[in-house]
Image: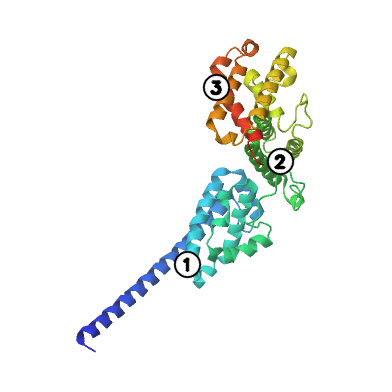
Amino acid sequence: MSRHTVFDAYDYADADRDEIMASLRDKSKDIDALNTAYNEIIQFLNEKVGYALSQTSDIIEELCLDEELREEYNGRFSVMSRLFDRVLPNPAALEYSEDYKTLAFIRESVAKMTRNPRFSNKDASKKVRAIIEEYLTVNGVDMEIAPISLLSDDFLKGGQSKKSDRAVSEEIKYAVREFININMPKDPELYARLSERLEQILEEFKNNWAELRKALEQLRRDIKAGRAKENTYGYDASHEMPFLGLLKTEFYGKKSFEELSDEQMGVLKNLTDDVLSRFKQETEAVNFWNNVALQQELRTNIIKLLISPEIKKQVPDIMKRRKDVAQKLMELGYQHFGRND
């Protein structure tokens, strides 16, 4: 071996040694950081949330109730999770695995109850998922299964009797809000009323968990019934009544249908009939919702209906709002005459 080659070999050996030492130092720093992150999240639960890690049900309830605590928990868990992932498969990480599973269970439970995917553990690496997935599934919070629909007969089954009134109230609240937000475009008048009623219930029975639970369970039943209990004036409850409801709101605000005069109801129904007839006829055209010209023609025809003498007599400011109302009708029309579901 030449002298030059010998020196190269020593250089490589030194370089390898330095790299190994640097890696060990970095790993040691990660282990220290993981320990710090773990201690901080445990301290947060004890001091701010007010419960020990073993009191998982109480922690979940508190986090669902308090958005600031929920966000802080999510942030602290994310930091610990990244460090836990980096230290694995070092045995030092395994010392935290049992508590980490519990922390992950809390996070996934909050994700399910608040219906907020930001709190799901689906973003975990394969290494971490291998540790927590079975634990979560066995404990009833499978990451791959979506929360039960508000309208499902199974929504209030399975473990609800073991939950406190407060926990059930929070679960219904988040499910109702999600359902309203999803369905608002399909029937703005109905779901605006239901949203307002939800907020009234939450305010009226604040901190009275037993009564709040009863009121929210009744609201859920009413949402499930939809417009079935209401007078639909001969219109299809799902696909036609939303147009009457939208026009009532635009013309008369929060007045109920029962508060309107016969003349006002007559004007509303005639206009609704005309609008529905236009939508049913013109959206039959092939590719209507991809044809800007055809949509503009329908919008123009709706505006003409809105500014008729009969409407202007009932709604003096309709000229100023005609385009806005027409656009809302077009958006509602897409929900009922443009969607495939």
| Residue 151 in view (yes/no) | yes
User: Which residue corresponds to mark 2?
Assistant: 209
Q: CA distance from mark 2 to mark 1?
A: 43 Å
Q: Residue 144 sits in which quadrant?
A: bottom right
* Mark 2 vs 1, N-terminal side: 1
Nearer-the-camera pick, 275 or 220: 275
Relative image position of residue 265 (x, y in whole percent): 72, 17
Q: CA distance from mark 3 to mark 2?
A: 45 Å
User: Which residue corresponds to mark 3?
Assistant: 323
User: Which residue corresponds to mark 1?
Assistant: 87
Secondary structure of the residue carrying tag 3 is helix
**Of marks 2 and 1, the one in the foreground:** 1
Picture residue at 51% right of the left edge, 55% below the top: 78
Q: Residues within 10 Å of mark 1 (few under 14, many from 20)?
A: many
Looking at numbered disc 3 in the image, what kind of residue is underneath it? Answer: Lys
Picture residue at 65% right of the left edge, 42% below the top: 174
Relative image position of residue 276 (x, y in whole percent): 68, 26
Image: 45 above or below 199: below
**Screen quadrant of the N terminus:** bottom left
Q: What's the coloring here?
A: rainbow
Q: Residues within 10 Å of mark 3 (few under 14, many from 20)?
A: some
Relative image position of residue 310 (x, y in whole percent): 65, 11
* Mark 3 vs 2, N-terminal side: 2
* Mark 3 vs 1, N-terminal side: 1
Secondary structure of the residue carrying tag 2 is helix
Q: Are marks 3 and 2 in contact (CB under 8 Å)?
A: no
